Image (spheres, rainbow, N blue to C red):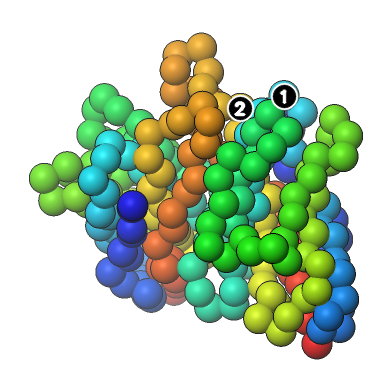
Amino acid sequence: EPEVTQTPSHQVTQMGQEVILRCVPISNHLYFYWYRQILGQKVEFLVSFYNNEISEKSEIFDDQFSVERPDGSNFTLKIRSTKLEDSAMYFCASSYGLGASGRAGHEQFFGPGTRLTVL
Amino acid sequence: AQSVTQLDSQVPVFEEAPVELRCNYSSSVSVYLFWYVQYPNQGLQLLLKYLSGSTLVKGINGFEAEFNKSQTSFHLRKPSVHISDTAEYFCAVSRTFSYNQGGKLIFGQGTELSVKP
């Protein structure tokens, strides 16, 4: 069964450093998402990406964040200068979009997450 | 804008007992509704979804949920739980899908289900 994969599983970095979190979405999916979950809090939407551009972003997704699909398989989240409050679990998700029925492809499949620890 | 409230942060229950995890949502537009489960140190797995049609939705692992539009609720139920159901459960809502924007999910705070022998 196809699945979303994420690397690394755990990233430790110093405050102010740049980090890149990597995701490989399911191959025929068209929509890609990043979410984050700070310890003990709810899962929060960061950004959605479609047709090689950001389609929607939240208030959290400020200038420190960027996303990229550098090739046909990877989807990355970059944090330019990490802060302590960026420590969280980051989830990548993908979906096909609207299927032939108009709705079938709407399900988002999540990766296992990358735990980012900023010291 | 949409929002989701999960009324219980923790639900302890004995094995083979029934369980209901409550979820209420708020939205000014039509929505899709989802329940996800997160086992320890794992990602989010879809349990079930309501897109349209029958208000009683059946999912994996014997779970079901009922969409109640008048009460804006989407409670998750299982008639008999197992130890292996111990996990965090998240209710989520998205507006109906848009080609340009996709369907971002808005999650509730989560309910920790603890099944005891």
Is B99 placed above or below A48 here? above
Quarter of the view holding residue A14: bottom right
Element class at badge 2: loop
Q: Which residue is drawn at 38% across and 34% down?
A: B96
Evaluate whether residue B44 shows in this view: no
Q: Which of A78 and A21 is in front in this view?
A: A78
Q: Is residue A89 left or right of residue B63?
A: right
Q: Where is residue A66 in the image (x, y as percent from the top left)?
A: 74, 55
Element class at badge 1: loop
Tell me the chain of label 1. Answer: A
Q: Nearer the viewer, residue A96 or B38?
A: A96
Q: Where is residue B10 in the image (x, y as percent from the top left)?
A: 38, 75
**Quadrant location of the C terminus of chain B?**
bottom left
Q: Name the residue under label 2.
A: A96
Q: Is residue A7 left or right of residue A41?
A: right
Q: Residue at x 86, y 69 (%)?
A: A18
Tell me the chain of label 2. Answer: A
Q: In this view, does B6 lie to the left or right of A14?
A: left
Pointers 2 and 1 in contact (CB under 8 A)?
A: yes
Q: Where is residue A15 in the image (x, y as percent from the top left)?
A: 82, 83
Q: Nearer the viewer, residue B109 or B21?
A: B109
Extreme residue in the front direction? A63
Q: Which residue is drawn at 51% across and 22% down?
A: A98
Type of the residue with mark 1: Asn
Q: Mark 1 points at which residue?
A: A28
Are the residues under badges 2 and 1 in a single subunit? Answer: yes
Quarter of the view holding residue A97: top right
Type of the residue with mark 2: Tyr
Sequence-wise, the earlier of marks 2 and 1 is: 1
Classify mark 2: residues with Cα within 10 Å, few (<14), some (14-19) or many (20+): many
